[in-house]
Image (cartoon, grey):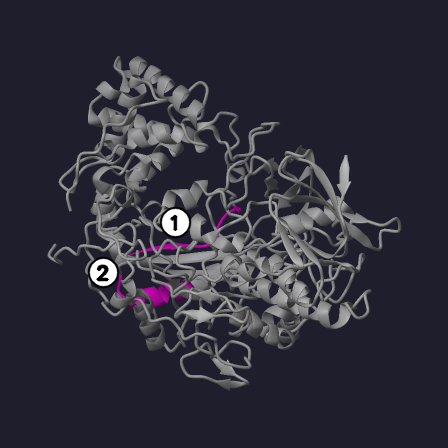
Amino acid sequence: MTTKLKPVDAVVVGTGVVGSIMAKELADAGLKVVALERGRMIDPQHDFAVPSTYDELKFDRFSDIFQDLSRETLTFRNSPGERALPMREMGSFKPGEAVGGTALHWSTHARRFLPWDFETRSRTVERYGKGMIPENCTSQDWGITYEELEPYYDQFEHLYGVGGKAGNLDGVIQEGGNPFEGPRSREYPNPPSPMTYAGTMFATACAELGYKPHVNPIAAQTQAYTNPYKLMLGQCIRGGFCTSHACSQGAKANPSTTVIPALLKQENCEIRPLSNVIRVNLDSDRKRATGVTYLDASGREFEQPADIVVLGAYTFNNVRLMLLSGIGAPYDPVANRGVVGRNYSYQSHGRVTMFFEEKAFNPFMGGGARGTAIDEFNGDNFDHSGLDFFGGAYVNVASAGALPIRSTTVPAGTPKWGSEWKRAAAHYYQRNFSIRVGGGCQSYRQNYLDLDPTYRDANGLPLLRMTFDWGENERKSIDWVTGKAEEIAKAMNPSRMNTSGQHGHYDIVPYQSTHNIGGAAMGADPATSAVNKYLQSWDVSNVFVIGGSAFPQNAAYPPTQTIGTLACWAADNIRGTYLKRPGPMA
Amino acid sequence: MQESAEAPHVFNYLTQPEVRFLDAAAARLIPADDLGPGGKEAGVSAYIDNQLNSVWGSHGRNYRSGPWPEGTPYQGFQSRLTPREIYRAAIRETNVHCLKQYQKAFEFLGPREQDDVLKGLESGTIELSSVSSKLFFGLLIRNTMEGFFADPIYGGNRDKVGWKLIGFPGVPPSNYNDLIDEHNVPYRVEPVSILDIRQGKVQLDAQGLPKHVRLGNQE
């Protein structure tokens, strides 16, 4: 039994960083909007109250703001020859499940991608020749440039109150900022954060080596701030408990602080929590969506008709809904044809942890990604001639608060338990910090998403299947940049050093990052992309698929700010162009 | 700040022999020594008992449908058994091994023998009949560390001994921003837990955040 509801102008799937902005912008344009969220409603004042947010165990493991895998997970294998098995326990990444989405627990690294990141393939071929790109690599241009997105990066930064220092204002390099960033039209809305001891030590060592250190731009408010939706955000108190955690201070910019309170006041928009969309409905010639079907908390089926369908969920859900609904051709890695599920990618990492004997870093004081970074080894900011990889990594220190279960780090070679471990843990907790090497991740033919033939969710629908392993390019680039990070580390004279790179196979167990991207890539060519540059489905023109799913490969920087920026860009183009003349925009 | 003795834990899931096993294991994984109390004193067994009664103990938020073939190490946890079931089976079977090998249960072995058994579980050289010993040890070490370092509301980290060991201050105050320029100056305080706040043991400011009491900076 399906209950057919009254039609609306637009239905938005998901209420995270994308869904919240899309619902707000479309409602502001006068549309009647319904936003469907599979998770529960969040009341930040009570859900994220003092002192219960200061609970490492809860947010590492139990919190119901993370996806409930008992109802839906995905299956995973390293290569197409293996049998995929379900990810039974949360590990490598933590997708969200609540009004506010995954961004409720992001760590606030608010970076614009480099201009190069949007034109990875053409610029690499242009500078180094075709031979630089491995044969099985499917990385491609985005079909959009940094220049086109710049006003929307600016919009997002003001929405989220990002604090930082410009490095390039209209082409003029600014002292103290990141000289490698693309030109920006104006300064950040908030000042950069005052610096921690670790961030200062790292910046000093980098400057002495001739690099250009700068303060990480972050969306943990560096001062009280009112955003363009007239919402007030509090100042970050540097209390730590940041990554994986919700913020009790209203200082971490996220959908629940920057957009949703304004959305809840809007009469022409409704957020329906505990509403799990299972399908986009298409008309008989499959060129037009008629709305979506969802299940409510008690499993009752509803059809919500709408003129516009926005898939604004997490990467996995956007791709899965396209596959379950038959929107776009599923990717076939053997023939290298089809687009949905193609170019799934992730984020590569290296790390150098330095241990000192006579220092005190007070590592529990932290706020978002507060720290410093250099960008000399990111993207194509350095000459790769003679190197056997392309792309790179940004090198940074960031203090989100070293919590004791996860961050009691000891020098390599120390036993994992017993007296020796205890002595090292007691001595070094206060006396270590890490340089993090955040790397890009190219896309490959053998890394993709499709529907699993065996395992099903609680509604009987096939789970998404992930086939993924690290590429040689990522192993090499992380090794190389981590070598540079080690040189910087040595300049600080630590007594001991742990170094880790991107070796071996991708392992779904240890937490790495919630930076799963691709599978519904945007692009200029319908043969290799699922959506056009306006995030509009090539096949069903009233469906927009917006999110990390649209990245054709991953940049080194964390993805959240670019995901939000794509929403601002898509919303503006829907308002300015599509609503006047519905139909294919490219 | 006055530390009152916390009420003894009433074990709900674990049996007395299981508690004695876990106390003995926690005492080797994190020994009491000149640096302070260890895992046993911190109440790791009480913590594990609480965890086995929680949603996590029965993998209530995990995917639990079959089929259950063995996976590669990169595919993660694939056992049909929940943590409750793993602890129950593995403790019993480890004791069977100890009785065979040493004619004594684990809790009665000397420290060196206990370490050998723990290493045998860790490396997988001791084979248990119904569960992988590595899987069991992985849960045991993870839960022991959690029971030592998680907020005392979960029953472990008694008297915040884990936090005192490393110098973690717990729930933050509202004034860390004032200290941002205190570079290389260790911030030492009596740690504050959520439990302390719930029990009304600490002074709070208008926001409900604790006022930390700083300790001297001498080692």
Could you say whether the residue bearing mark 2 is in a helix, strand or loop? loop
Q: Nearer the viewer, residue A250 or B151?
A: A250
Instruction: Look at 26% across and 26% down and name the residue there.
Output: B23
* Image coordinates for residue A218, horizontal then vertical, percent: 44, 67
Instruction: Look at 52% across and 81% down and name the residue there.
Output: A186
Pointer 1 residue:
A53
Magenta segment boundaries in residue numbering: A483-506
Image check: A305 left or right of A483? right
* Image coordinates for residue A372, horizontal then vertical, percent: 38, 69
Callouts 1 and 2 close, C-beta under 8 Å: no
Furthest toward the bottom, the residue is: A172
Three-letter amino acid code of the residue under disc 1: Thr
Q: Earlier in the sequence, mark 1 or mark 2?
A: 1
Q: Residues within 10 Å of mark 2 (few under 14, many from 20)?
A: many
Image check: B148 left or right of A173? left
Instruction: Look at 44% across and 26% down and name the residue there.
Output: B132
Query: Does mark 2 fall on the same chain as mark 1?
Result: yes
| Quadrant location, the C terminus of chain A | bottom right
Let me know if residue A329 appears in the view: no
Q: Residues within 10 Å of mark 1 (few under 14, many from 20)?
A: many
Pointer 2 residue:
A360
* Image coordinates for residue B208, horizontal then vertical, percent: 31, 53
A492 part of magenta stretch: yes
**To which quarter of the image does residue A457 belong?**
top right
**To which quarter of the image does residue A211 belong?**
bottom left
Is A214 drawn above or below residue A2 in the view shown?
Answer: below
Task: Check the residue under mark 1 and report the chain it is in.
Answer: A
A193 part of magenta stretch: no
Q: How far is disc 1 from disc 2 in space, using C-alphas? A: 26 Å
Q: Nearer the viewer, residue A292 or B143?
A: A292
